[in-house]
Image (tube, grey):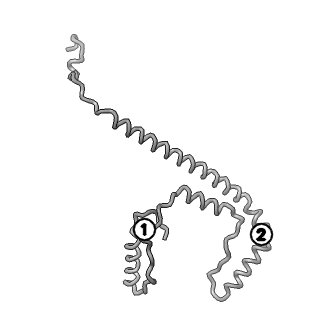
Amino acid sequence: MKLMGRDIPARELVARIEERLRERGLPSSERADVPEQGVEPRVDPLSFNLQALEENSDATRALPLHTHRGGAGQLVLVAKWAFRKTCQVFINEALSRQRVFNGHVRDSYAQLSAEVIRLRAEVETLRAAQAAAQEQTPPAEPSARPRRTAKQTKAPEER
């Protein structure tokens, strides 16, 4: 189970799902083994999205053939396979510009991700420096001389 972080209690989630299944009269699945350490660690969205863009950037690369049909499903798969084999040249030509565009998007995303990572590191450095500076400087004491009121700051002829 791949979730975003350890904030979600996996055992409780599975127990609630099984309870809801039982309430609806559906048999629960066999016992799911939830690792002792919980769910997988949080996924870095920048690297995850970059990897997804990398995997899917080539629009001419075909997805695996599949069908939802029952009995005639094999015939449909054969027809899809024959269409791909005979028309792949035209498919590549039609999607060539999309493939180039997807490559530019992937590269731009990689550059922006690198910039975000660099800026995060810089912010952390600045925050650490600011915290260290605040620890070293004692709090400012209030000044000993009293402040003047508006009446005291006016010129003598205006009073």
14 left or right of 89? left
Give the numbered dot on residue 37. Answer: 1
**In this figure, which residue is indicated by the disc labeled 2?**
88
Write the residue at 45% across / 84% down: 30
- Compute the Cα span from label 2 to label 1: 47 Å
- Residue at disc 2, secondary structure: helix
Marks 2 and 1 in Cβ contact (< 8 Å): no
Write the residue at 77% across / 69% down: 88
First in sequence, mark 2 or 1: give its number.
Answer: 1
- In the image shown, does 33 or 111 lie closer to the viewer? 33
Mark 1, Cα crowd under 10 Å, few <14 / some 14-19 / many 20+, is: few
Return the x and y of residue 7 as percentages of the image width and height.
Answer: 40, 63
Which of the 4 image quadrants contains residue 152? top left
Q: Is residue 125 above or below residue 76?
A: above
What amino acid type is highlighted by mark number 2?
A: Gln
What amino acid type is highlighted by mark number 1?
A: Gln
Asked whether the viewer can see residue 149, the reply is no
- Residue at disc 1, secondary structure: loop
